[in-house]
Amino acid sequence: MTAPGIRTRHRERHGAGRAGWLRAAVLGANDGLVSTSSLMVGVAASGASSGALLTAGLAGLTAGALSMAAGEYVSVSAQADVERADLVAERAELTNSPRAELYELAGIYERRGLPPELARQVAAALTERDALGAHLRDELGHNEQNQARPLQACAASASSFAAGALVPFLGMAAPSGSARIALIVAATVVGLAVAGALGARTAGTPLARPTLRVVVGGCVAMAVTALVGALVNTTGV
């Protein structure tokens, strides 16, 4: 029975459940935009032909997407391995020292502000219901929302990288080298602004600061690679 005055249908929107794939997707999109556009701007600034520019862009897109996929899978799999190891260790501790684990759980609740007697009652009730779940959640900080999901992170990162990397190819529509550079930069800045705004909106944060951060970082990267490309062209290397 529901206690009087308690609302049973109360919906709240939080970003914790989206943190894993959102981080991978935002990182992938930004990396795809910045790395591919920087590569293409650097190659274009060196005076390379349109064929060489297209080849460099396609190579950067393919290599970057595969690299992001592999990197995310390996790193998030390592996190999943740690979570599994914690589960095994905690299960063994509950089997070997159940009373000590109960006291440990009660101590956690006391440190969070519950009176000692109430902390013991809560610990006993949660232990009876799901001792392992209580320790994983309240002792180790593991929960379903932030659980490591390697395949999800891998797919989100690779697909978002590829999507972001396609944007700079709009610059290939320009007829000359300098116009291509300008169009690549313009398309990338717009893409970065959109990616930053979408990431901030999905996370539920204000738009201005994340968007500006993404755009400025991308512009710096393109400027540096354009300088390198121009120097290569000037020195004839």
Image (cartoon, rainbow, N blue to C red):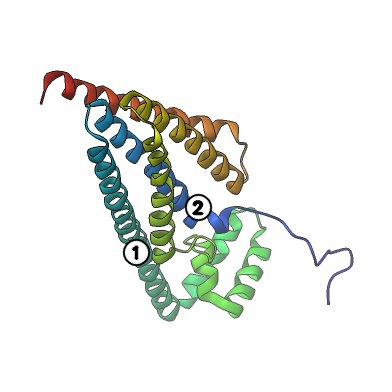
User: Dot 1: few (<14), some (14–19), or many (≥20) neighbours within 10 Å?
Assistant: some
Q: Residue furthest left?
A: 237
Residue 75 in the image, given as x and y percentages of width and height: 33, 57
Return the disc, 2 or 1, that comes first in the chain's sequence.
2
Viewer-side residue, 198 vs 22:
198
In the picture shown, does residue 115 fall above or below 208? Answer: below
Q: Badges 2 and 1: C-beta atoms under 8 Å apart?
A: no
Q: What amino acid type should be assigned to the residue bearing mark 2?
A: Leu
Distance from disc 2 to disc 1, alpha carbons, whole Å, reads: 17 Å
Q: What amino acid type should be assigned to the residue bearing mark 1?
A: Ser
Mark 2 highlights which residue? 22
Q: Which mark is residue 212?
A: none
User: Dot 2: few (<14), some (14–19), or many (≥20) neighbours within 10 Å?
Assistant: some
Residue 23 in the image, given as x and y percentages of width and height: 46, 50
Q: Secondary structure at mark 2?
A: helix
Report whether residue 53 is seen: yes
Q: Quadrant of residue 32?
A: top left
The N terminus appears in which quarter of the rendering?
bottom right
Mark 1 highlights which residue? 77
In the picture shown, does residue 49 fall above or below 72? Answer: above
Q: Secondary structure at mark 1?
A: helix
Viewer-side residue, 2 vs 220:
220
The residue shown at (41%, 61%) is 155
